[in-house]
Amino acid sequence: MITNKAAMHFNGDWAKGEFIAAGQTAGKEYGCTVVGQEPKLVIGGDVFVFPATKDKTTLATQDKLIQVLLDPTTQIEFNKKKGSIPVRMDVDVSSMDMCAQKSHSILSDPANQVESMEILSPPNFSGAMQDAVTQFWNNPTMSADAFIEKITNAMRDAG
């Protein structure tokens, strides 16, 4: 896409950072769309995990980090650079590009939020699925039947 060697690309918001780094602008050099008749977006996300503690200084530091990370200005500025949308749905995204505004609008209705496979499935299943897809993608001699067998085994073993 960025080098004009592809007409379209299916990807998540993480790819938009590459367009930003290449100096491209949503709505100008590239666009975005949601596939399907009813707009739904897969949600997931990065998390910050704090160690359990009773130390008041550590707890205060953790609280301060949370305040900074969830501050509306921080949310907007970080997401403009990464290409994602704020985790907070109450943040004004009018200064963001058309792709972010579209995603934010869709996700503002919880009925349009589809949890990612990693949230819904046990880690061994997610890993086995990812392994199967990677092997199929990178091995041109793997048959569709062999791929289906790997997927079926992953489902069976996850139960």
Image (spheres, rainbow, N blue to C red):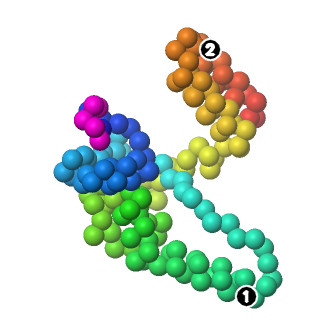
Pair 1/2: label in front? 1
Is residue 147 toward the left or the right of residue 23 in the image?
right
**Displayed quadrant of residue 38:** top left
On the image, the x and y values in percent for residue 73 come to: 40, 77
Task: Say which amino acid is labelled 1.
Answer: Thr
- Is residue 125 shown in magenta? no
**Residue 139 vertical placement versus 9 (above, below):** above
Farthest residue in the left direction?
Answer: 28
On the image, the x and y values in percent for residue 96 come to: 30, 65
For the record, the magenta segment spans 2-6
Residue 107 in view of the camera = no
**Displayed quadrant of residue 1:** top left
Q: Residues within 10 Å of mark 1 (few under 14, many from 20)?
A: few
On the image, the x and y values in percent for residue 54 come to: 80, 83
Specify the principal SS of the magenta part: loop
On the image, the x and y values in percent for residue 92 come to: 34, 73
Q: Residues within 10 Å of mark 2 (few under 14, many from 20)?
A: few
Task: Mark 1 and mark 2 in contact? Answer it, CB < 8 Å.
Answer: no
Residue shown at the point (67%, 86%) measured from the top left: 60
Q: Which residue matches tag 2?
A: 146
Label 1 and label 2: CA atoms lie apart by: 55 Å
Q: Secondary structure at mark 2?
A: helix
Residue shown at the point (71%, 24%) measured from the top left: 153
Q: Which residue matches tag 1?
A: 57
**Displayed quadrant of residue 97:** bottom left
Residue shown at the point (52%, 15%) measured from the top left: 140
Is residue 86 toward the left or the right of residue 115 in the image?
left
Mark closest to the chain's N terminus, 1 or 2: 1
Q: Secondary structure at mark 1?
A: helix
Which circle marks residue 121 in the picture? none
Task: Say which amino acid is labelled 2.
Answer: Ala
